[in-house]
Structures are given as C-alpha cells and as structure tokens.
Image (spheres, rainbow, N blue to C red):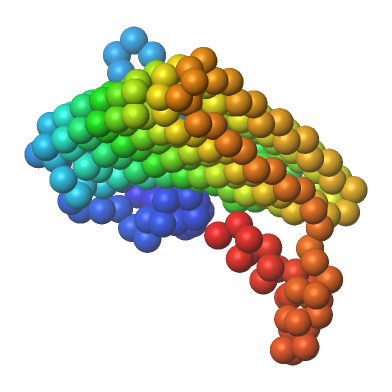
C-alpha cells in the first residue's frame, strides 16, 4: 500500500508513526477502509463482519506489546463511523495507540464518529492513547464524536490519555467506565480550542467494587471565541477512592464551563474534586520575556508546558 506525504504527516501527528511498522499488531483506516491490517502472535486484529470497525483480542499474559489503530480522513467532506472492540486478556500488559486525523480542504464537513468498547480482564493492564487533530484550508468543519465504554474487571488497571491537539471545530466526547474490585482507572484529558471551536466532554466513572479507584485529570486551554463544556461524574458504590481535577486557562473571549459531580452511595467512599479556571499569570510572562522571549513565544511556552 502506497502512502502519500499527507497520510504520513497525519499518522505521525496522531500516533507518532514515522513509517509503517514491520512487526506488531496494526490497523490503519483511511477514508472508511482498513488499508493496513496485521495481527501478531499474541494480538489478533480483525475487521467486523456486521458493521464497520475492528476487533482486537489480546491473549492472556501478553506483555509489553503495542497495537496501533489510527484513523485518517483525507477525502473531502467524508463522514466516517467506526465500531471498535478491544478485549484485553487476563494479566496482559499492552498499549493501544489510537487517534484520528482529518484533512479537509472542502466546503463540506468531514467527521469521524468512533464508538469504542474496551474490556480489561482480571489482572490486566492497558494504556490507551487517543489523539485528535484537524487541518485544511476549506470552510468545511472537522468534527469528532468519540464515545468509549470501558469495563475494568477485578485487580485490573487502565490509563486513558485523550488529547485534542488543534484544528478540531466541533467535538462531543463521551466516556463511561465501570470499575470493579481492587481495579483502577486514570483518565488524563488534554484539550485545546481556538477560533470559534466548541468542545464538550462528559466522563462518568462508576466504582462498583470494593477497593476500586478512579481518577480524572483534565487540562484545557480555550482561546479566541471558543467554548468548552466539561462534565465529570464520580459514583462510589462501595469502599473506594475517587478524585476529579480540572484546570483550565482561558484567553480572549473564550468561555469554559466545568461541572464536577460526586455521588457517594457508601459511607466508605472517599471522593474529592478540585477545579480552577484562570488566565496566564503576568509574572510568568514577564519572567520568560526577561530571558529574551517575545510575548508570543512566552505564551506558547507556557501553554505547551501546561498541556503537557
């Protein structure tokens, strides 16, 4: 399969792929088609037969393997919907690199709707990284509507890193998690909006097993006239620990609404939250500019550090 420079630029941005790996499990989807699909001895990657999408099955006990499942859209005005299932076998330890990049030079909107279901079996560990990025000079929008349902079985753990880099005009993200006995989940969300962009993110974590823990860490920057809406809900049904932390930098005429919600259904559920929205501190700018940076360079440095 031949890849254009544009394809590789998008893949590099969303999944750090400088080329197509010769080893390991991988699935690359372009404009609705799986153009590269390969399994490894421990990880099976196969297309669904009843609807667009794929199923990834990781064998029990698999260690230190990476699965790449990026999506790119380069066809003008293309609207993509994909259903992905990930089953992580008992005591496995894997990293899944997902994400989607849209290039749209047309007047029609391009969109990607990713519907994901993740099952982390007993004692397994997963790191899931999903980056979204949009580019192109056309007036058409670049739209993302990802939804993820993750079920973490007893003594398993998951870390989800969800990043919106730039160029995304509209996004509505939904994440629902169920955490069982002695299991844990950490969600890290980093979000940048600019221009007239709008982003909504809703995360719901239900801690259902004794000794379970859930953590949501959100950092965002809203610039120009963009709008961000963030909702984080933690439900503790038994003895557990949960924490929500959301920090935002607001610039220009942007608007940010942050709504953390804690619900305890057990006296031994310990749930906490922190939230802060503010502008860049003047002393930070002055300090960096005194080192020779321009104001723009100083702002960019502060924002890069904050989001990373």
Q: Residue furthest right?
A: 253
Residue 145 shows up from this direction: no
Which quadrant is home to the C terminus?
bottom right
Q: Is residue 164 left or right of residue 47?
A: right
- Image coordinates of residue 290 in percent, x first then y, are 77, 88
The residue located at (37%, 29%) in the rendering is 212
Which quadrant is home to the N terminus?
top left
In the image shown, does 182 or 2 lie closer to the viewer?
A: 182
The residue located at (69%, 68%) in the rendering is 302
- Image coordinates of residue 180 in percent, x first then y, are 33, 22
The residue located at (42%, 51%) in the rendering is 15
In the image shown, does 79 or 213 lie closer to the viewer?
A: 213
Q: Residue 161, relative to residue 120: is it above or below?
A: below
The residue located at (51%, 44%) in the rendering is 188
Residue 40 shows up from this direction: yes
- Image coordinates of residue 147 in percent, x first then y, are 52, 25
- Number of numbered markers: 0
Q: Quadrant of residue 108?
A: top right
Q: Residue furthest front?
A: 267
Q: Is residue 136 left or right of residue 121?
A: right
- Image coordinates of residue 153 in percent, x first then y, are 28, 24
In the image shown, does 274 or 305 lie closer to the viewer?
A: 274
Q: Quadrant of residue 91?
A: top left
């Amino acid at each position: 399969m031949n890849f254009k420079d544009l394809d590789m630029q998008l893949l590099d941005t969303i999944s750090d792929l400088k080329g197509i790996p010769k080893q390991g499990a991988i699935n690359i989807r372009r404009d609705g088609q799986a153009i590269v699909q390969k399994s490894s001895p421990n990880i099976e990657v196969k297309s669904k037969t009843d609807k667009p999408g794929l199923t990834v099955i990781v064998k029990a006990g698999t260690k230190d393997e990476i699965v790449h499942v990026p999506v790119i859209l380069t066809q003008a005005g293309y609207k993509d919907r994909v259903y992905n299932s990930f089953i992580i076998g008992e005591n496995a330890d894997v990293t899944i690199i997902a994400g989607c990049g849209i290039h749209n030079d047309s007047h029609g909107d391009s969109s990607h709707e990713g519907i994901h279901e993740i099952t982390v079996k007993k004692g397994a560990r997963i790191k899931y990284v999903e980056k979204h990025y949009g580019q192109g000079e056309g007036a058409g929008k670049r739209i993302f509507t990802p939804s993820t349902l993750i079920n973490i079985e007893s003594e398993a753990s998951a870390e989800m890193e969800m990043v919106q880099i730039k160029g995304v005009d509209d996004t509505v993200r939904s994440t629902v998690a169920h955490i069982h006995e002695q299991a844990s989940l950490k969600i890290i969300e980093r979000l940048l909006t600019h221009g007239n962009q709008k982003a909504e993110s809703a995360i719901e974590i239900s801690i259902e097993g004794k000794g379970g823990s859930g953590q949501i860490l959100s950092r965002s920057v809203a610039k120009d006239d963009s709008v961000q809406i963030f909702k984080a809900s933690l439900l503790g049904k038994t003895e557990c620990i949960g924490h929500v932390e959301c920090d935002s930098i607001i610039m220009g005429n942007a608007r940010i609404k942050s709504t953390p919600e804690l619900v305890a259904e057990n006296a031994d559920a310990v749930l906490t939250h922190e939230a802060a929205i503010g502008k860049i501190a003047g002393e930070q700018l002055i300090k960096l500019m005194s080192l020779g940076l321009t104001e723009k360079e100083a702002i960019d440095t502060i924002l890069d550090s904050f989001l990373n």
